[in-house]
């Protein structure tokens, strides 16, 4: 949030020397999904007092910022991303007093608190929507997107929806309200009606809510699907998708015509004049590098960074449930493009997974024989890129995907709805189950594994979601006790980012872009250069063709995930990653 500090010299015209260092360049963010983090009252659901209980653990890990997925009052149709009261805590998670205590105790440990801002939509149980649907003449009717049935069609008739868009959670993106005979837009579930940001009253209500949380000590926001708030009017039909009756409406709501105007207005109304070092990160499905430069250029006062989705879509075919193998060269090309694209202006977020993505080690690594090595390799590669790393709860323990047995093991609305819709479109149950096993968000939502006890120390009650049976082996107690564990490898990487400016601000340079198994790059700042070499395969890989190879042979080994490799640049063992440093 550089507005406060943004004096003329901090905004840099093209081609000038590297920008001013921002505090979050050397920060690491830890994401907590409260339902699955730590239960403190035995009801089987994680809560705020549970987070407080684990603050020392997080301080030991060394993270700087805690991003809390939604904890607001909510009917939990989408696990909290459907909010019915923005200024109260859901009783499942605790009270405002519990929240204030969490903020105080986190700040006492130098950890900032970032809230999840979900304002593209509310819950259909939010008083705003209850009033809006009450009548066509409601003062809040225009706070949401209401439309009559498609011209010449009766309300409720198949295809009578105002546009042919598909919801992210399968089915149409419009729901008929029988009482008023009109449809309302919901890009996600029917219990998540989209807010109409064209209405200045809506925007002011959101800004007031955000100021309320900042006044309460919050240090920033992760903004949910924030690049969907500006719709391209008039709302009209999209191209019908090959795999179903509905169409892709994204051209009419991804990075819409007023998105930069809205984010700059938000910045002026909420953040300008605030001195605290705040953090804003916009979750932006389908955002491009060029758009991200505009969104994250400090001189434009929009957001500090964005979550882009390119690298978490490389193993998708036509859609996320159409899985295909990931090619390392494609991954390098994608992440390399984002590094280069935001090298001069803007800033990257760095993540392998979150509460919407399968577990990183199962997806990008090897969660079998080389689970520990590949978990450390993924951390090494990600944390030494240029940008702010995000650690998703349990990632620092090397937690894996969940061994789902049957379709009714899935609880996530996106997976449950997709299973039903896919069968309706003739896909075989076995086939869909396999796709869910690989791609379901539920893989990320099993409770954090704190110890080897029956419910992994997550709860003394019955967990809302079964604990992964591999918690007997994979758990925080075991990791903390083993100095060579995945946990301590994350701790060392975070220490490196805190202590070494080349990690926080060094220029990024990709090497061996076409190599099918080796991911290699350098970071350089002033006289220092750091080399990262990583073997994304289960076979030994010679490190041939590396520019300046002979020089690296004598360099200092800063970090590795195997016992000492020996002199020179010996071949990389399966899933081995090494970090070298040399001074010019
Ligand atoms: O996710 C938006 C989003 O893009 C995801 O829905 C994504 O498409 C999908 O999960 C990939 O499988 C945000 C939140 O992170 C998510 O948890 C919410 O369900 C969604 O918005 C609606 O608020």
Image (cartoon, rainbow, N blue to C red):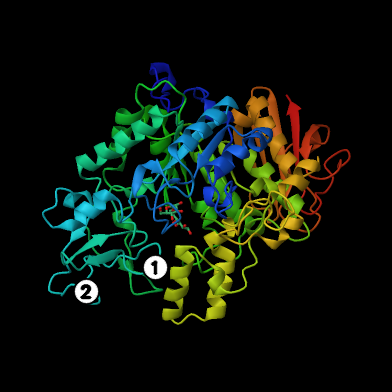
Q: Which residue is mark 2?
A: 156
Number of the label disc, if any, that sits on residue 186: none
Number of the label disc, if any, that sits on residue 170: 1
Say if residue 233 shows up in the picture.
no
Q: Is 466 positioned to the left or the right of 557 in the image?
A: left
Q: Ligand 1 lies in which image quarter?
A: bottom left
The disc, 2 or 1, on the residue closer to the chain's N-terminal end is 2
Say if residue 256 shows up in the picture.
yes
For the N terminus, the image quarter is top left
Residue 248 at x, y = what percent?
Answer: 34, 64
Structural distance between the alpha carbons of marks 2 and 1: 18 Å
Residue 151 at x, y = what percent?
Answer: 13, 70
Residue 429 at x, y = what percent?
Answer: 53, 80
Q: Quadrant of residue 510?
A: top right
Query: Who's the residue at 20% across and 40% down the image?
Result: 201
- The foreground one among 196 and 205 is 205
């Amino acid at each position: 949030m550089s507005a406060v500090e943004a004096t003329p010299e901090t905004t840099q015209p093209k081609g000038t020397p590297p920008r001013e260092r921002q505090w979050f360049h050397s920060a690491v963010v830890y994401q907590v999904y409260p339902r699955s983090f730590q239960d403190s009252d035995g009801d089987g659901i994680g809560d705020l007092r549970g987070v407080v209980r684990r603050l020392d653990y997080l301080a030991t890990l060394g993270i700087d910022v805690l991003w809390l997925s939604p904890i607001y009052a909510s009917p939990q149709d989408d696990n909290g991303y459907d909010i019915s009261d923005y200024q109260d805590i859901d009783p499942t998670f605790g009270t405002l007093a519990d929240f204030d205590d969490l903020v105080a105790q986190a700040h006492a440990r130098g950890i900032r608190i970032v809230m999840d801002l979900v304002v593209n939509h509310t819950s259909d149980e939010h008083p705003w929507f209850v009033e809006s649907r009450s009548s066509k003449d409601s003062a809040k009717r225009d706070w949401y997107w209401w439309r009559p049935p498609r011209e010449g069609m009766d309300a409720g008739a198949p295809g009578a929806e105002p546009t042919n868009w598909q919801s992210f959670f399968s089915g149409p993106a419009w729901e008929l309200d029988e009482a008023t005979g009109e449809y309302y837009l919901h890009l996600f579930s029917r219990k998540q009606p989209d807010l109409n940001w064209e209405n200045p009253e809506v925007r002011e209500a959101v800004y007031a809510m955000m100021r309320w949380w900042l006044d309460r000590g919050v240090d920033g926001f992760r903004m949910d699907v924030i690049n969907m708030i500006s719709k391209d009017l008039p709302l009209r039909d999209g191209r019908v998708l090959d795999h179903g009756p509905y169409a892709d409406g994204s051209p009419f709501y991804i990075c819409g015509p007023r998105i930069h105007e809205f984010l700059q207005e938000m910045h002026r109304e909420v953040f300008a004049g605030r001195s605290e070092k705040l953090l804003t990160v916009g979750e932006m499905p389908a955002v491009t590098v060029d758009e991200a430069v505009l969104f994250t250029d400090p001189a434009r006062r929009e957001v500090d960074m964005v979550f882009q989705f390119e690298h978490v879509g490389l193993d998708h075919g036509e859609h996320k449930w159409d899985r295909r193998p990931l090619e390392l060269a494609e991954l390098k090309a994608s992440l390399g493009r984002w590094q280069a694209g935001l090298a001069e202006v803007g800033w990257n977020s760095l993540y392998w997974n979150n509460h919407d993505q399968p577990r990183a080690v199962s997806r990008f690594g090897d969660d079998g024989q080389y689970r520990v090595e590949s978990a450390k390799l993924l951390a090494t590669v990600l944390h030494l890129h240029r940008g702010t790393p995000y650690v998703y709860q349990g990632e620092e323990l090397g937690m894996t995907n969940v061994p789902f047995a049957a379709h009714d093991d899935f609880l996530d609305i996106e997976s449950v709805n997709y299973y039903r819709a896919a069968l309706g479109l003739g896909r075989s149950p076995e086939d869909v189950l396999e796709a869910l096993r690989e791609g379901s968000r539920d893989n990320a939502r099993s409770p954090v594994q704190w110890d080897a006890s029956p419910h992994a120390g997550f709860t003394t009650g019955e967990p809302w979601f079964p604990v992964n049976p591999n918690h007997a082996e994979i758990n925080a107690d075991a990791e903390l006790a083993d100095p060579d564990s995945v946990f301590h490898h994350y701790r060392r990487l975070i220490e490196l980012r805190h202590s070494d400016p080349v990690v926080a601000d060094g220029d990024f340079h990709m090497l061996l872009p076409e190599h099918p198994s080796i991911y290699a790059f350098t970071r350089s700042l002033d006289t220092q250069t750091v080399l990262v070499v990583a073997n994304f395969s289960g076979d030994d890989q010679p490190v041939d063709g590396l520019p300046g190879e002979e020089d690296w042979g004598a360099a200092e080994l800063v970090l590795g995930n195997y016992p000492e490799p020996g002199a020179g640049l010996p071949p990389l063992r399966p899933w081995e990653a090494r970090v070298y440093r040399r001074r010019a």
